[in-house]
Structures are given as C-alpha cells and as structure tokens.
Amino acid sequence: MTTPSQTVGPYLSIGLTWDDGPFVAPSGTPGGFWIRGRLTDGNGDVVPDGLIETWQADPDGRFDHPDDPRGAAKPSVEGFRGFGRSATDQNGEWGVYTLMPGRVPDQAPHIDVSVFARGMLHRVVTRIYFSDEIDSVLATVPPERRGTLIATPTDDGYRFDIRLQGDGETAFFAL
C-alpha cells in the first residue's frame, strides 16, 4: 500500500537543524563569506519556518562524493563539507557560511539550493550563480528570469533572496 504525500508541517525544523548546519566551511576560513537571503511566498510574505539546504563543489570544483564523474576527491580546504542547512527565522532570513565554489566541467561556479516549506509537497530546487556567465544549465532559463539566480554582492558576501511564487519568482528546476 502506498502512503499518500503530505505537505511539510509547521514542525519542519524539529530534528532537521543542527548548530553548525549553516557552516559549509569552518568560521574564519580564509576566503569564507556569508550568503544570506530571505524566503518569501507568492504574496511576498516572509516564510518564517522554511529550510534552505545548499550543496556545492569545493574551491577546486570537486566533490567528495562518488557521483562526481571524475571520482570523489577530498576537499581542498580542511573542514569544508560542501553541504549546508539553514532554517529561516521569524523574518524569513537564512544564511550559510561558505567558500566560492570552483568551476565544475562545463558549468559556471554555482551552489545548488533546495527549499523546503510548509504547504509544499516536495522541495523546490534552484541555483545560486555569482555572475551572469551563461553555462548549459543557466541557458535553459528564459533570459528574463536569469537574474533571479544571480547573487548580489554585499559587505560580507552575497545576498540571494528566494521567492516561491508570483512576481519575481525565483527560477526553479524540474528534477
């Protein structure tokens, strides 16, 4: 018997967050920076109980994962784990501390992002790019929506707001 799908409930963060979850790289790592943003719904209201997960290559463009077609490689920076997780706060704000990802073959430097929130049956997936360099994935996004995938520089890193629906909706990818 198949169990029916359920939306993510209001207790999403129980057991899913941990103290060092936002740290893809250890605090103070040379070259480290924050990516911060706000998660909003279709009305532009903040989502105070969402969860943002990030996955990225190390600064050399490698993954310590067997699915890396070049073979798994230990991170080039000690303590770098490639994965981050940040709950949104009462203002819908989230943040991860990381390093600039290296170039993966045929792709511009980017960070993969999964978004979980109440009312959603499944996560949505997007990417953070750091420039408007068009790679094979960004080329699939209509030109007028590409800007929703490019982070904006700030004093301590980058800003990347995520809008789930409506005007200015972030471009999401079907997996």
Image (cartoon, rainbow, N blue to C red):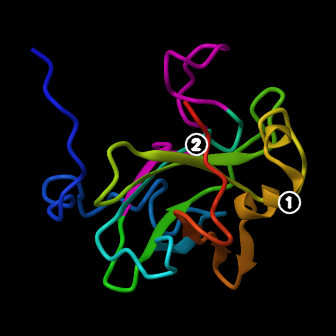
**Which part of the image, by quadrant, shows the N terminus?**
top left
- In the image, taking residue 28 as reference, residue 109 lies left or right, namely right
Is the stretch drawn in magenta largely helix, strand or loop?
loop
- In the image, taking residue 94 as reference, residue 172 lies left or right, namely right
Reply above or below: 134 against 100.
above
In the rendering, which numbered label is found on residue 144? 1
In the rendering, which numbered label is found on residue 56? 2
Quarter of the figure with residue 2: top left
The structure residue drawn at horizontal position 52% and vertical position 63%, both measured from the top left corner, is 164
Specify the amino acid type for callout 2.
Answer: Gln
Q: Which residues are magenta?
A: 62-86
Q: Any magenta on residue 70? A: yes
Along the line of sight, the residue nearer the viewer: 111 or 117 = 117
- Which badge, 1 or 2, is on the more N-terminal residue? 2
Reply above or below: 63 against 100.
above
Query: For the residue carrying disc 1, how many other residues have a C-alpha within 10 Å: few (<14), some (14-19), or many (20+)?
Result: few
